[in-house]
Image (spheres, helix red, strand yellow):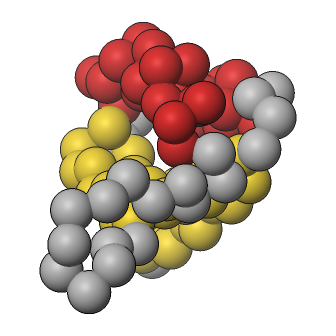
Amino acid sequence: MDRHIIVGVHVTDRLENAAPVQAILTEYGCYIKTRLGLHETADGRKCCSKNGLLLLEMIGDLSETNAMMAKLEAIPGLHVQKMVFEHF
């Protein structure tokens, strides 16, 4: 059975949480196939938005995804969700 695993990470304080989030993503980098980061901008001007959203397409064993999610959820200000699309 094949599946797509997507993890969404809403970061409510990017400036405070960037380093610990990056450390976890580096630790699980071999299980991340695709990484997309989204954040607010102000009318095309350069600014660092406080909030951000990461979308991660995961590969490998689901237990590794769950372990990564648990570490991310332990960081205050993060909200983590998972979507699993099964192919039969």
- Residue 55 versus residue 63: which sits nearer the camera? 55
Q: Visible in this render: residue 80? A: no
- Residue 33 versus residue 3: which sits nearer the camera? 33
Question: Going 32% across and 38% down the picture, which residue do you hit?
Answer: 32
Across and down, in percent, residue 33 comes to: 24, 44
Res. 59 image quadrant: top left
* In the rendered image, the vertical position of residue 30 relative to residue 2, given as above or below: above
* In the rendered image, the vertical position of residue 86 relative to residue 47, given as above or below: below
Across and down, in percent, residue 41 comes to: 33, 73
83 displayed left or right of 3:
right
Question: Going 38% across and 53% down the picture, which residue do you hit?
Answer: 48
Question: Going 21% across and 62% down the picture, which residue do you hit?
Answer: 46
- Residue 81 versus residue 74: which sits nearer the camera? 74
82 displayed left or right of 74:
left
Considering every residue shown, the one lying at the far bottom of the view is 43
- Residue 42 versus residue 76: which sits nearer the camera? 42
43 displayed left or right of 61:
left
Q: Visible in this render: residue 18? A: yes
Across and down, in percent, residue 64 comes to: 56, 27
Dividing the image into 4 quarters, which one contains the C terminus? bottom left
